[in-house]
Amino acid sequence: MRRVVYAADDPNPKMRGGAAALRGAGLEVTGGLLAAEARELNIGFFSRHERGRPWVRVKLGASLDGRTALADGSSQWITGEAARADAQLYRARSSVILTGSGTVLKDNPSLNVRIDGAVRQPLRAVLDTSLRVPPTARMYTLDGLATVFTASADEARIAALRQARVQIETVEKSAAGGLDLPAVMARLAALQANEIWVEAGARLAGALLTARLADELVIYLAPCMLGPQALPLAELPPLRHLSGRVHLRFLSAELIGVDLRIIARPDAGQA
Ligand SMILES: NC(=O)c1ccc[n+]([C@@H]2O[C@H](COP(=O)([O-])OP(=O)(O)OC[C@H]3O[C@@H](n4cnc5c(N)ncnc54)[C@H](OP(=O)(O)O)[C@@H]3O)[C@@H](O)[C@H]2O)c1
């Protein structure tokens, strides 16, 4: 007897029918073994096919009192080397590393994968409504592809960015301010992006949470305190009632070097 055991059905409609074809050919076929684990392993692929948008992980490095930068914007480095190396692994597994113009203008980050032997650089993308980020930004000039999402039609700036080999994606502004985030995610899904790794400041992190587009938070908590004048994890609209809070559930908490890595996901049951 020839037997095939598989974990999960392919969510891509073009790929349906494999199990039936094998059964038709006389094989014994069993599906669903370790299906939950298989979905986790391919979480972005399932997300893109089932929800039409990528899986969005938001990384935040914070002090124990939940502060991500000093009031003047300095944030390098709150967390230790091991946490930063761990974040590199997340970068490497992602299709896209996404940030906001605020972080690029303040920190001029590289947003690339710096792991020995890494062969693929994820797309580096920035949300920059009015093209404030210059073509000389580090994330635009390193190896690999870079894209700016913008609502600007400023021809001179667009030409200068194109000259620097930056791809331009035009999207509408949202009523809440900034760019239309669902449109950005739909476009990234159309570009076949499965997993997005967001490394941004409180503004974009908060906007993604508010729009319910943050699927997972990866928070590295450093054993230090920065005090209430420092910047928060996420800018959220003021709450009148506790019932309006963003509900999360913890998936794990683990020491990474000297820091604590907490992984949390929105709790759909409580939302
Ligand atoms: N601790 C950490 O993990 C960490 C990580 C990254 C950054 N940081 C710190 O965060 C600070 C910067 O934070 P930030 O809040 O100013 O910048 P940010 O969240 O990186 O970027 C925010 C900017 O993105 C643009 N944007 C476009 N569409 C948006 C939308 N729908 N929602 C939200 N933003 C949108 C807006 O600028 P436009 O109007 O120009 O489009 C907005 O001001 C820096 O001090 C940096 O060091 C900390």
Image: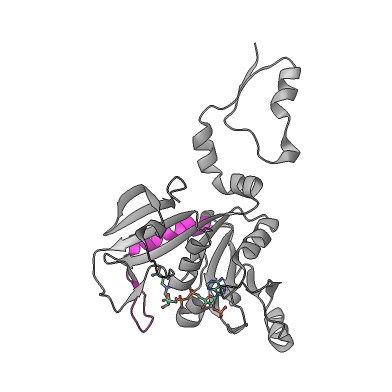
Please say if 114 is above or below 270.
below
Please say if 191 is above or below 70.
above
Q: Say which residue appears at 47% left-offset and 47% top-offset.
A: 268
In this rendered view, identify the residue nearer to me: 9 or 179: 179
Q: Say which residue appears at 76% left-offset and 18% top-offset.
A: 24
Please say if 248 is above or below 106.
above
* Furthest residue toward front: 240
For residue 139, which quarter of the picture? bottom right
Task: Answer yes or no: is residue 201 visible.
Answer: no
Q: Which residues are magenta?
A: 68-92
Residue 201 place in picture, x, y as percent: 44, 72
Residue 128 place in picture, x, y as percent: 59, 77
Residue 224 place in picture, x, y as percent: 23, 68
Residue 194 place in picture, x, y as percent: 60, 52
Q: Is residue 54 left or right of residue 34?
A: right
Is 77 inside the magenta-drawn segment?
yes
For residue 142, which quarter of the picture? bottom right
Q: How many marks?
A: 0
In this rendered view, identify the residue nearer to me: 81 or 43: 43
In this rendered view, identify the residue nearer to me: 14 or 122: 14
Task: Answer yes or no: is residue 269 visible.
Answer: yes
In this rendered view, identify the residue nearer to me: 244 or 40: 244
Please say if 219 is above or below 142.
above
Q: Say which residue appears at 52% left-offset and 42% top-offset.
A: 41
